Image (spheres, rainbow, N blue to C red):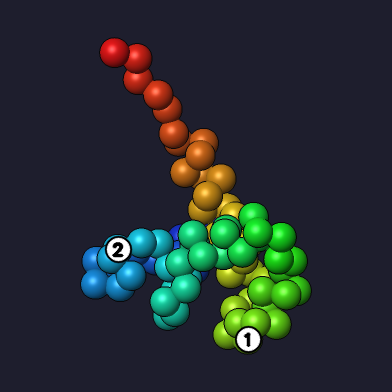
Amino acid sequence: MNYHDIITIEPGKRSGKPCIQGMRITVYDILEYLAGGMTEAEILEDFSELTSEDIKACLAFAADREKNLFVVSL
């Protein structure tokens, strides 16, 4: 999935955290709801402005960051 059109990072919005475009909902917010046991349907019900694509974009963004994470030994 290409999340680049959905997830934006703006210095003046939510302290520069990755957000869903046009909203103040962060990727972290969505991931925390999912990790806490909320279903996609429950999130969409609570936040009517979100779409299923938005949630998938958050997951893709997180997966991409994880893929690019590496540890340097000192």
Q: Is residue 34 above or below residue 42?
A: above
Residue at 40%, 24% (x, y): give it. Answer: 71
Residue 63 as seen in the image, left or right of residue 73: right
The residue at the point 35 percent across, 20 percent down is 72
Q: Position of residue 55 (x, y in %)?
A: 62, 66
Res 58 quadrant in image: bottom right
Q: Amino acid at mark 1?
A: Ser
- Residue 1 in view of the camera: no
Distance between the alpha carbons at the discs numbered 1 and 2: 24 Å
Residue at the spot 44% in from the left edge and 34% down from the top edge: 69
Vertical comparison of 68 with 60: above or below:
above
- Foreground pick, 25 / 61: 25
> Where's residue 45, x and y in %?
70, 82
Any mark on residue 39, and which?
none
Q: In this picture, is 64 found above or below 56?
A: above
Residue type, numbered disc 2: Gly
Label 2 residue SS: helix
**Residue at the spot 73% in from the left edge and 75% down from the top edge:** 42
In the rendered view, does 38 fall on the left or right side of 2? right
> In the displayed structure, would residue 38 be above or below residue 59?
below
Q: Is residue 37 visible?
A: yes
Tell me the quarter of the image containing the C terminus.
top left
Of the 4 image quadrants, the one containing the N terminus is bottom right
Q: Is residue 21 left or right of residue 36?
A: left
Which residue in the structure is indicated by mark 2?
A: 16
Q: Secondary structure at mark 1?
A: loop
Mark sitting on residue 48: 1
Count of numbered circles in the view: 2
- First reached walking from the N terminus: tag 1 or tag 2: 2
Decide which of 50, 29 is in the foreground and name it. Answer: 29
